[in-house]
Image (spheres, rainbow, N blue to C red):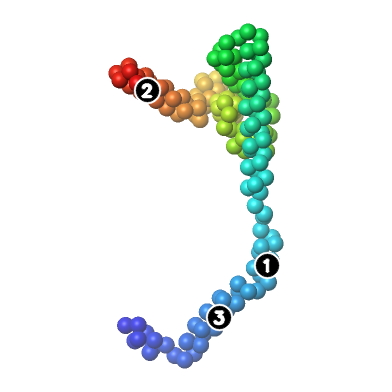
Amino acid sequence: MKKENERNLSVKDIQEQSRIKKYANDVKKTPYMDFVFQRSPKSTHWKNMFWAFVVGGLICAVGQVIIELFVQNGVEQKQASVYASCILVALAACATGLGIYDNLGRFAGAGSTIPITGFSNAVVAPAIEFRSEGMIYGLAAKMFTVAGPVLVNGIFVSSFIAVVYLIFGV
């Protein structure tokens, strides 16, 4: 079948196909590729990863400082960790309400979303965005659009682990 198709092609068609193939190979060698490379946006992955690391580390360092302050004032380590988490959540919620956390998120990316402050932002941001729809359908319903599945999953997994622990005593 292939031989038959080749026979049906005229000399002119074969020359045209070879010219197209040659042109396709030559396009890679033209200044057009240099032009595209120059105009394409440069990758900022390394810069983004650096700032995510720095900002995420700073948020965690602030949390550690809060814990250390509580421990120095006689609070037990576990209780100090709970207080620090609550303070970080409250600070992130206030920063989200003031629009500061959105700017931090644009700058730091995942560095601002990974610590517990990112969870606080995920709860507060939809509530603020949809507050114009009212207290029930806007604020209350949208508050847990992002955080709801996380909470449900966390409650389910912790309950499952508790049952396994009760049954097997592991």
- Residue behind mark 3: 22
- Residue behind mark 2: 161
The reply to whether residue 106 is visible in this rendering is: no
Instruction: Give the alpha-carbon distance from disc 2 to disc 1, as whole Å.
Output: 58 Å
Q: Earlier in the sequence, mark 2 or mark 1?
A: 1
Give the residue type at disc 2: Ile
Q: Which residue lies furthest to the bottom in this view?
A: 11
> Residue 4 falls in which quadrant of the image?
bottom left
Residue 20 at x, y = what percent?
53, 80
Q: Residue shown at 50%/27% (left/top)?
A: 147
Residue 46 higher or lower than 66, as above or below: below
Q: Are marks 2 and 1 in contact (CB under 8 Å)?
A: no
Q: Residue shown at 66%/33% (left/top)?
A: 55
Q: SS of the residue at dot 3?
A: helix
Residue 38 at x, y = what percent?
70, 62
Question: Total number of numbered labels?
Answer: 3
Q: Which of 102 and 64 is in front in this view?
A: 64
Give the residue type at disc 1: Asp
Q: SS of the residue at dot 1?
A: helix
- Residue behind mark 1: 34
- Residue 167 is labelled as none
Q: Earlier in the sequence, mark 3 or mark 2?
A: 3
Q: Residue shown at 42%/88% (left/top)?
A: 9
Residue 112 higher or lower than 23, as above or below: above
Q: Are marks 3 and 1 in contact (CB under 8 Å)?
A: no
Q: Is residue 102 left or right of residue 144?
A: right
Q: Which residue lies furthest to the top in this view?
A: 74
Q: Earlier in the sequence, mark 3 or mark 1?
A: 3
Residue 143 at x, y = what percent?
53, 25
